[in-house]
Structure formats: structure tokens, C-alpha cells
Image: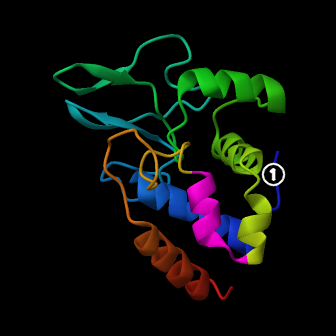
Amino acid sequence: MAITIDVKLKTFLSLISWSEGTSIAPLTKNLGYDVIVTGIHGPSVFTDYTDHPFAHGGSVQFHLNPPEFSTAAGRYQVLAHYFEAYKAQLGLPDFSPASQDRVAIQQISERNSIHLIEQGNIAGAITACSNIWASFPGNDYGQGGHSLAGLVAKYTADLAALGG
């Protein structure tokens, strides 16, 4: 099911994928929609969109000591257990790009950030969504990330390139 996404929200979604590293991942063949969290064995992708790659178990080890595991996958690095909840809530048929976009938009909406994006308050939207994406500043995931100023600058440049 296709949904209409305005240029500001589209640019914010692209910012997430850039920040998470999925849209620029070396192995992606589908703008990051096919990316599995990079683990200790390097980058990985999937090709079957019928369900989340870890819907039936498994995970990727991403730290050695102490060992940590993740089920993050797709353009927005959605964890398998979150996808299962959103799949039911939103009536999603699969883990296709359209379904991944709907999950990300729902997550943004749950942080009351759609209106912030519409108003151009990108710093506010990033801050409100920082507990969702590890690459956003202001969370305690300890996975590094980008500065707020750097993300706002990237968003602004990308929006201008799209004519927004």
C-alpha cells in the first residue's frame, strides 16, 4: 500500500537512513531497505521482504566484550520485536520498503514529531526521536552517532536539493 509522503517528511526519513548508515551501506542494493545491522562479521543484507529477517529468531552479534546482540534490520534499523507489534497495529503485509516507511512514520508520529518536521523544527524532531535511532544524539545507546548540528545541516542541504 503506497502512502503519500511530503518532501519534508521524505527528507527526514532519508536523514534517518543516512544517519543509521543504511542508505550508504556498501552492500545495499535498495537504498538501505535491505540492510541488516552490522555485526562483528561485517555488513550484511537480505533479499526476502516477506517478513522481518529475524521474525523467526536469530540476531547479529555486534560487540565482543561483553557480547551484545541486535535484530535491527531495514532502512530504519527496526528491531524484530518492534516490527511484530507494528505489523499487527498497522496491518502490514510484509517488511517491504512501504511497510518499513510506515513503521518509521508511525514511530515519528508517536514522538509527536510530524508537526515539528512540518514546521521546520528539525532539531526538535531529532531530539524527540533520539531514543528510537541510536545514531541520533541524546540517547544512551553508546553507539556513537552524529551531532545535532551536523544532522540539521544534512537535512537542510538535502531538503534544498529536493527543492523544499
Farthest residue toward the left? 65
Residue that appears at 64% across and 39% down = 96
Q: Judge by depth and name the residue closer to the eye, 68 or 37.
A: 68
- What is the secondary structure assignment of the residue under circle 1? loop
- Asked whether residue 13 appears in the rendered view, the answer is no
Quadrant assignment for the N terminus: top right
The reply to whether the magenta stretch includes residue 121 is yes
Which of 57 and 155 lies nearest the eye of the viewer?
155
Closest to the observer, 67 or 36: 67
Q: Position of residue 21 (x, y in %)?
A: 38, 54
Q: Quadrant of residue 60?
A: top left
> What quarter of the picture does the C terminus occupy?
bottom right
Q: Residue at x 43, y 51 (%)?
A: 20
Up-down: is 104 above or below 122?
above
Q: Which residues, given as a range, are shown in magenta?
A: 120-129
Dominant secondary structure of the magenta stretch?
A: helix
Q: Position of residue 140 (x, y in %)?
A: 41, 40
Residue indicated by mark 1: 2
Residue 71 percent coordinates (x, y): 45, 25
